[in-house]
Amino acid sequence: MSCQPFCPTVRVYDPPVTVVNDVFHPQIVEVVHQINVVNRHHCVPCEKHLYQYCYQDEVASEQDSNNSNRSHKRHKSGKSYISKSKKKKMK
């Protein structure tokens, strides 16, 4: 038996149900971190070795001084000078 003409289709509605679909979008939030930089300057002792030379010629004996005219002091510049007393002896 067919019941279509006698039993029509009926719609019944339930109360609505809410379904939440969360969609996230990035939002930039700038966080500023302040940094203070202090440059400290320190003196650190570092050795630097300097050498100063002083040259002096000496007479080994009286005999050697009579034979050599090189028994005199030298300046730092390399120039030599003969003392007044030695000049007198050489003459």
Image (spheres, helix red, strand yellow):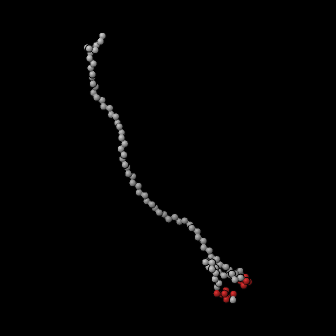
Number of labels in the image equals 0
Whether residue 62 is visible: no
Q: Is residue 87 above or below residue 3?
A: below
| Image quarter (top left, top right, bottom left or bottom right) of the N terminus | top left
State the image coordinates of residue 82 (x, y, percent, origin top left): 65, 84
**Quick one: 26 or 53, which is closer to the camera?**
26
Q: Quadrant of the C terminus?
A: bottom right
Is 74 positioned to the left or the right of 14 in the image? right
- Along the line of sight, the residue nearer the viewer: 8 or 84: 8
Q: Residue at x 66, y 82 (%)?
A: 72
Q: Residue at image x 37%, y 49%?
A: 31
- Residue 52 appears in which quarter of the rendering? bottom right
Q: Is 35 situated left or right of 64 in this image?
A: left
In the rendered view, tell whether residue 82 sits above or below residue 19.
below
List x then y, in percent, for residue 28. Answer: 36, 46
Residue at the (41%, 57%) spot, across then down: 36
Residue at 27% x, 22% y: name it: 11
The vertical placement of 51 against 15, above or below, is below
Residue 74 x, y percent position in the rendering: 64, 79
Q: In the image, is 19 to the left or to the right of 35?
A: left
> In the picture, residue 7 is in which quadrant?
top left
Relative to 41, 68 lies left or right: right
Displayed quadrant of residue 21? top left
The answer to whether residue 42 is seen in the rendering is yes
> Extreme front residue here?
5
